[in-house]
Amino acid sequence: MARGRRTRGLMSLTWEVKNPASSLATLTLLILAFLCKGLQSQYPGYELKALKAVTVLRGLCVHIPCNFTYPTSEDRYPEELYVYWIKDGSAGSYIHNTWYENAGSVVASSYKGQSIASFARNRFQLTGNPSEGDCSFSINDVKFEDEGQYYFRIEKGTLKFSYRASFILPRVSVTELTEKPKFLNSSEVVLGKSVTLICQAPGTCPWKESWSQPQISWSNWPTTAQNHQHSNGSWTFASGFTFTPTLQDQGRGLTCSVYYPAVGRTIVNTLSLEVVYPPEVIGITRPGHPDFSAQKEKLVVREGDTVNLLCEAQGKPFPSITWMKNNKPLNNHMQGSKETLQLSNIKSEDAGMYQCQAENLHGSIRKNLSVIVQYRPRTMTFTVTHAHKRDPALARGCPREVASGSQLTVQEGNLLRLLCKADSNPAATTSWFKEGRALEKLPDDWLELVNVKAEDQGDYRCQAQNAIASAEGFLHLLVEYAPKLSKTPQKNTTCWRKDNGILCNCSLHSKPPPRIHWQVGGMTVAENTSTADLKVSSSVQKNEVTSSLIWTGSPDGDLSIICLGNNSLGVYTMQFLLGSLKTGTGSHSALLLSGLCGALLAAVVFLLCLGLIKFYKKRKATPKAAIPEAMDSANYVNSANGGQQRANNFSLIYSNILPQGQRSPHVGPPKAAGERTPKPRQIARPPSPSAEEPDEVHYTTVAFKSKGPPPQVEESVEYSEIRRK
């Protein structure tokens, strides 16, 4: 602050009284000065700012900050400025060698020759710089007699002024030293974390002699203290004690002691430690199941069970428990206490990773438990893959899944592989059955059908079983195949003389059913055609179609009749060759002789073929050759294998069976009648038929009777005797 100038006048209250009795004017001025002392602080240019009320403990110290101003316009002479702090009272005092009645006791002054009251000597000190307008002062080793109101006075040459307005003057109150030291931080400490505890106590001013300063100690741990001044003018001492808490420190008492030498007293305060720590030692148990260890991380239960899980953890403060599944809270499963998780009527979807989390203000910990739910086999599914017989490498299908009860359609000759799977826990073992008979699987659990046959059609059942129960699923297999000759003897494919014409039957079966049409003399005849000399009719029974052709015309020469049966998988062809059998004027005996020779030749060929068949049976152990189906002896005779037969009378018609070509489709080289391609692997499968149809296209020649000898026929032609009705 700027220095003020001195001001002279009646209101300056200079108290310059040399002889009060000699001058009435002087006395009057003094009386007015005392009467108006409460208004002087409001005199323009004179201001004082100081603490109004200060409380201090006996034996300690207090610092009172203060600032002042005076009018600079009145400061006409460069004399030195002196300041005084005076305890207000009735005592008279010398102020700068001038006696003043009832002025009070001077306790501090910047004038070195000033006399100080005995009770304040060496305890009151000016701490501010008056030349800068700082009038602060302090009191050490406060005593009860220090209580009271204090005012400030300045003198500079003839300028003498006292700041005595009561509302701006500081008042000091003294109380007994009973206040205990304070702990600035909480008694709560965290386990394992270094902490500093601070003990604070009222203190003395820092410039006081060291012997009289308070001494702070921590339960036999001597420490140093630091001073701190507060805005209310008081001073405090503070001491810190640093350590790392352990669980052994739980409830331990730490004592902070403060000894005040000036008054010979020790003030003590004790702190009880509360060691807090994050959750630890977490565990999950099953009440009532002592066999379930808290250290286990896996729990196996069965579908429909009810499970109670208890989560326990240690921590301070006591941790809160939260149950989660796959890191998501499980509020809807909570029953009973918050630490218990109850899973009622467990389902397979209840399986998963469960977490118990314990948490407090200082951290969290988590325990995982894998819940495995066992359940019976269900949701049967089948994996299917198959390869086409024409090119297995290129036509192998990708595996696909089908549901239980599905229908599969495959082509004859294909390779079919089936795998049965069931949703179950633990995993189920599977077994295959067809028509009540067990089928053998491959080592990799696949069921394989090599070179599928029509007889493989049917229901395939898979049984899945685990330790809990079993379940079944099935697939219905449909086998598609190209047209084949009928196996029914009454529907054999042949031609014979009937009345004045020729009746030809063609009976084929396939899946899907075949469509049969005829070619007569190179002309195609559609189904159910009817003309003057030609009639075609057909009948269908499931997958078997029988077509009949009645021809009443007369050929001008050889006539070819062809039966064609086809579906999306192939074509089957049967050809009948009809020609005129011309006879000369020879006798009946010549015809009979020719017939006997033909029969003899046919018998020789039959015996040779029979020997060859037996030879191949022994060498290759192939299935027995199919026995030709018997024909109605009243109407026709089947051709014998390898045999050759001549007619013995004019009523016989001859038909030969010549190989013309392979039927379509075809895989591999031609094979003998009754011979099957051996399987690459012996796999249990539905039984195969005992007879196999020939794969070749057949030819039949029908010769009409006429005069003259029968035409010459090569010996390799097979004959089938056909009787006329």
Image (cartoon, rainbow, N blue to C red):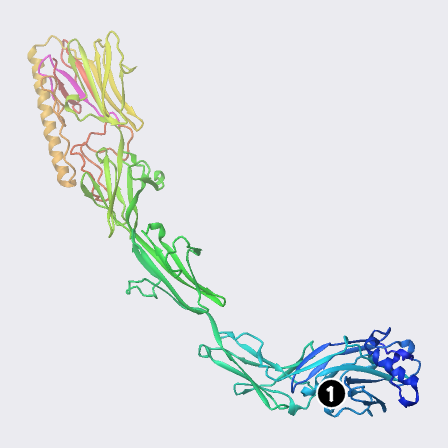
Residue 714 image position (x, y, % from top left): 18, 22
Question: Is 684 on the left-hand or right-hand side of 408?
Answer: left
Magenta part mainly helix, strand or loop? Answer: loop
Q: How many marks?
A: 1
Q: Which residues are magenta?
A: 645-661
In depth, the one of 723 and 648 nearer the eye is: 723
Q: Amino acid at mark 1?
A: Phe
User: Is-magenta flag for residue 291?
Assistant: no
Residue 559 image position (x, y, % from top left): 23, 14
Residue identifier under label 1 = 124
Q: Quadrant of residue 226?
A: bottom right
Vertical arrangement, residue 391 with respect to residue 700, above or below: below
For image coordinates 55% across by 80% down, the residue present is 242
Vertical arrangement, residue 670 with respect to residue 303, above or below: above
Question: Is 28 on the left-hand or right-hand side of 578?
Answer: right
Q: Which part of the image, by quadrant, shows the C terminus?
A: top left
Element carrying mark 1: strand
Vertical arrangement, residue 421 with respect to residue 583, above or below: below
Residue 721 image position (x, y, % from top left): 13, 19
In depth, the one of 361 and 627 nearer the eye is: 361
Vertical arrangement, residue 651 with respect to residue 610, above or below: above
In depth, the one of 293 and 546 nearer the eye is: 293
In depth, the one of 398 and 278 nearer the eye is: 278
Q: Is residue 296 visible?
A: yes
